[in-house]
Structures are given as structure tokens and as C-alpha cells.
Image (tube, rainbow, N blue to C red):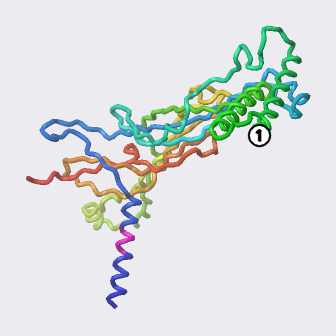
């Protein structure tokens, strides 16, 4: 019996912990008050920081791309291209005063944006003699095959007798670098870089749906009373009935953060060439403490709203549950006597 009672108490306690974590309420004192000897005038505002990391993939076609099939056996891309992708994003609450937000995105693993291009003097040029594009491609292909032959001879000890250990490893690494340099002349260069952008969104006060006021239904008029009872009816007029009014529902808030295009990356919010990146704040139903009508201390309780960052009309980039003061409630308490 004692064991079952203990289990029941533990279950009740665990359910209370779960409920309290789900209803984790963030509050802030508002109005004018004295704190540490200073007069404070505080408001409860919410500013959201939206972090977006974009991957930029650049490809520059090689100058001998159209000769790749003839000399190396496989086709190569003939045109340059740039593709942007959103690879990481997050939404967090920023301090409204200085727009300071935690580093919700780890930037250490992202490289800086860079450009890709071939040098004006190509690495396969070994003399001042002018060559046609066909002749230069032929020489570059011949050099690729020569490097592969040298690598094979080094590995099989047919070339460079006595080259071993760190010297052999260094020689093979240099051959790989040179071969890659020559291959890029045919198959082009590809580089992937990343850029990070942070946007700040100031949340506006919540808007409510319009509802029609509830009017109490009129009761049927009683039959005409005799003349002697009319004075009594006038004296005993019933009080007017007041119908309970429904509480209006808060509407979700939508903010245009930026726009995005696969060919151009992040764009300004008014650039219609890109898809819209929208921040949607959807308040949830929460329970708050009751206000004291005599209260003179005010706290603003935040609403744990569902915050979603979307690309276009359907693609969800990130979802968070964040405290939003504008969708919460102001509660007054009586200041305790000292």
C-alpha cells in the first residue's frame, strides 16, 4: 500500500514538472518603480533576431572545356554558373536596447565569400610562343598524361631510385596538385563559400479578430396586468440582463524579413525577383495569474508563441517557441507591505 501511494505521488509530481515546463512563463516588471535606488521606467518589448546562412556555389568553365571530350574522353560544362542555397537559419530573442542576440548560428565552420577566376597567364603556358586554343589544349592534355605516368613510375620505383618516405609523399602530393591544375583548364573550377546575414524584427502589438457583441435574448412580454397591479409592476422592475462577451482571439502576425533567389541569393524585402522569406508568429493559449483590482505593481507576462520562418508559401526553414511580450498579458499585484 505504501509503495503504490509513493508511486502515485511521484507520477503526480512528474506531471506537475511537465506542465510547468510547458507553461514556462517569462515575465518582466513594467511601469515606473525604484530599483537599487534608481528610478526605472520599463516597457516589455520583443525584438527577434533572424539569422540566415547562405551557401554560394560558383563554377567557372575551363578555357579548354570544349576539347575535354576529344582529349580526355568526357564532356565538360561550357558555361559559368552560380547557385545559392539557404543551408542554416535560426530565430532568437534579441535585447531590444542594443539589438544583442546570442550566436544561435555557429559561424566558425563557415568560410568567407570569395570569387573564382582563372589567371590571365594560364599555368600550362611554358614559353612565349603563341599557340592556338587547339594547340594549347593538346599540350595541356599531354602534360596530364605525363604527370600520371610519372606518378605511376614513382609508386612502382621505376623513377627516382631512392625516393621514399617523406620525400616520396611530398613528390606525389606535388604531382596531384599539378594534375588538378591542368584538369581545371578542361573541367573548370568549383568553389563553395558561405555568408551570414542577421535581420532584426521588432514585434508589433497583437491584433485581434473582430467579433460581434452578444446581445441577450429578449424575454416575452407578460400579459397586461390589471389596473391595480400596474403600480406594483413599475416598482418591481427587474435589472437588465448582461450577456457574457467572448474574449477576442489574437491573430497571427506576419513579417517579411527578406527575399531569396537561387541565382542572386538574399535580396531586399521589396525585390520581387525573389521568393519571400516570412516570419510568422502564432500565439498559443496560456494561463496567467489573476490580476488584483487594487494592484499597483504591474508585470507583463510573455506568450510562448510558435515562431516559424518560411521560404515562399510552404517551405518551413526553422521553427521555434519563443516568449513574445506583445501577445502576452499585463497582470497587476498588490505591493507587499514592508
Q: Is residue 47 above or below residue 67?
A: below
Q: Residue at x 86, y 24 (%)?
A: 66
Is residue 262 visible in the rendered image? The answer is no
Left or right of 285: which side holds 157?
A: right
Is residue 136 visible in the rendered image? The answer is yes
Q: Quadrant of residue 11?
A: bottom left
Q: Quadrant of residue 311?
A: top right
Q: Is residue 172 above or below residue 249?
A: above
Q: As rendered, which of 43 and 101 lies closer to the eye?
A: 101
Q: Which residues are magenta?
A: 12-16
Left or right of 296: which side holds 211?
A: right
Is disc 1 surrounded by few (<14), some (14 to 19) or many (20+) residues within 10 Å? some
Give the residue at mark 1.
157
Magenta run includes residue 13: yes
Q: Residue at x 77, y 26 (%)?
A: 182
Q: Percent position (x, y) of residue 171?
A: 69, 33
Q: Residue at x 43, y 48 (%)?
A: 322
Q: Percent position (x, y) of residue 56?
A: 63, 32
Q: Residue at x 37, y 58 (%)?
A: 287
Amino acid at each position: 500500500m505504501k509503495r503504490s501511494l509513493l508511486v502515485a505521488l511521484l507520477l503526480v509530481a512528474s506531471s506537475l514538472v511537465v506542465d510547468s515546463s510547458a507553461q514556462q512563463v517569462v515575465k518582466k516588471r513594467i511601469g515606473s518603480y525604484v530599483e537599487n535606488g534608481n528610478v526605472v521606467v520599463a516597457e516589455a518589448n520583443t525584438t527577434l533576431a533572424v539569422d540566415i546562412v547562405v551557401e554560394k556555389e560558383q563554377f567557372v568553365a575551363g578555357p579548354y572545356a570544349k576539347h575535354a571530350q576529344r582529349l580526355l574522353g568526357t564532356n565538360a560544362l561550357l558555361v559559368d554558373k552560380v547557385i545559392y542555397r539557404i543551408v542554416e537559419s535560426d530565430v532568437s530573442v534579441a535585447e531590444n536596447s542594443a539589438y544583442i542576440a546570442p550566436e544561435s548560428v555557429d559561424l566558425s565552420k563557415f568560410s568567407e565569400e570569395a570569387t573564382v577566376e582563372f589567371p590571365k597567364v594560364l599555368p600550362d603556358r611554358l614559353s612565349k610562343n603563341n599557340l592556338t586554343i587547339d594547340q594549347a589544349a593538346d599540350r595541356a592534355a599531354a602534360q596530364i598524361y605525363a604527370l600520371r605516368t610519372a606518378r605511376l613510375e614513382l609508386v612502382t620505383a621505376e623513377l627516382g631510385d631512392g625516393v621514399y618516405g617523406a620525400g616520396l609523399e611530398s613528390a606525389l602530393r606535388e604531382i596531384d596538385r599539378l594534375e588538378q591544375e591542368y584538369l581545371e583548364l578542361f573541367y573548370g573550377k568549383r568553389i563553395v563559400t558561405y555568408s551570414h546575414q542577421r535581420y532584426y524584427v521588432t514585434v508589433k502589438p497583437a491584433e485581434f479578430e473582430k467579433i460581434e457583441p452578444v446581445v441577450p435574448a429578449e424575454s416575452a412580454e407578460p400579459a397586461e396586468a390589471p389596473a391595480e397591479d400596474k403600480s406594483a409592476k413599475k416598482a418591481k422592475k427587474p435589472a437588465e440582463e448582461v450577456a457574457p462577451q467572448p474574449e477576442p482571439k489574437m491573430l497571427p502576425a506576419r513579417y517579411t524579413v527578406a527575399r531569396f533567389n537561387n541565382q542572386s541569393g538574399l535580396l531586399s524585402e521589396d525585390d520581387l525577383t525573389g521568393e519571400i522569406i516570412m516570419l510568422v508568429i502564432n500565439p498559443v493559449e496560456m494561463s496567467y495569474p489573476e490580476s488584483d483590482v487594487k494592484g499597483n505593481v504591474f508585470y507583463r507576462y510573455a506568450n510562448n508563441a510558435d515562431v516559424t520562418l518560411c521560404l515562399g508559401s510552404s517551405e518551413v526553414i526553422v521553427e521555434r517557441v519563443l516568449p513574445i511580450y506583445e501577445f502576452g498579458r499585463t497582470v497587476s499585484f498588490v505591493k507587499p507591505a514592508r
